[in-house]
Image: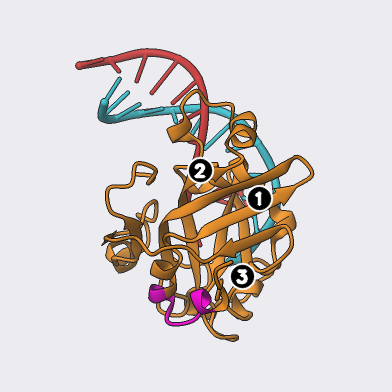
Chain colours: A orange, B cyan, C red
DNA sequence: CTTAAGATCGCCT
DNA sequence: GGCGATCTTAAGT
């Protein structure tokens, strides 16, 4: 059994954590079974100085509260009937997080198919709202830690090559829309765009 | 293949 | 009351 050394993933700057997470395994267990995927795409959201972040200017609300907690906590929020999942990535008091945007299915693929009801496997987890549905991640997971019993991250092999570029879907955030805070495993088929 | 629009609801002002 | 860190479907090329 290899040493997991999971905590190391969550430490370092948020931009480092976003890259540390690539290649790691995201696992969710429910009564229906276990589903897991390799993280292949992430986005960093820096709090205070990042207009695209919910926690811009350290805004502390019911929704962003968990981002002020220790690294490795689970930040889930809903938009348009979809859940999006983030990893809290900065020391307590500094509200930053990393959005998980895409996975490569690894385990429980039949379970993902039944949840997603899509013809092509490529569409199971290649987007932030899609992967939460495929794994069964919901608002129930808000505030948990990624070292829990039913939702956790396992250390994996870092990709040989990592690409970066502007984030997706944040057109109305001024300068922030151009920040190269999106990271993905180069040439992986399961990235969202 | 690409583009466009509608769904639909919790959070925040 | 307005607005999304999105997804799906339908129609156009």
Residue A140 position within the rendered picture, expressed as x and y whole percent measured from the top left: 75, 56
Q: Residues within 10 Å of mark 1 (few under 14, many from 20)?
A: many
- The magenta stretch spans which residues? A8-16
Discs 3, 2 touching: Cβ within 8 Å: no
Magenta span dominant secondary structure: helix
Residue under label 2: A105
**Nearest the eye: A16 or A48:** A16
The numbered mark, 3 or 2, whose residue comes first in the sequence reads 3
Work out whether residue A81 can be spotted.
Answer: no
Where, by quadrant of the figure, is residue A13 drawn? Answer: bottom left
Relative height, residue A79 to residue A45 (above, below)? above
Asked which secondary structure carries label 2, the reply is strand
Residue under label 3: A64
Residue under label 1: A137
Residue B2 position within the rendered picture, expressed as x and y whole percent measured from the top left: 26, 29
**Nearest the eye: A70 or A55:** A70
Which of the chains bears the disc numbered 2?
A
């Amino acid at each position: 059994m290899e040493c997991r050394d999971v905590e190391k993933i969550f430490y370092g700057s948020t931009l480092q954590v976003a890259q540390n997470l690539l290649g790691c395994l995201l696992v969710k267990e429910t009564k229906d079974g276990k589903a897991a995927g390799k993280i292949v795409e992430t986005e960093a959201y820096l709090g205070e100085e990042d207009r695209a972040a919910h926690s811009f200017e350290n805004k502390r609300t019911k929704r962003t509260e968990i981002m002020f907690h220790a690294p490795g906590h689970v930040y889930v929020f809903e938009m348009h009937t979809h859940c999006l999942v983030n990893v809290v990535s900065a020391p307590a008091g500094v509200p930053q997080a990393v959005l998980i945007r895409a996975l490569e299915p690894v385990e429980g693929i039949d379970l993902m198919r039944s949840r997603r009801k899509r013809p092509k496997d490529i569409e199971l987890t290649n987007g932030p709202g899609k992967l939460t549905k495929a794994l069964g991640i919901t608002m129930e997971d808000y505030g948990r830690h990624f070292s829990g019993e039913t939702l956790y991250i396992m250390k994996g092999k870092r990709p040989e090559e990592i690409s970066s570029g502007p984030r997706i879907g944040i057109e109305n955030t001024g300068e922030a829309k151009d920040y190269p805070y999106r990271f993905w495993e180069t040439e992986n088929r399961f990235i969202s765009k």
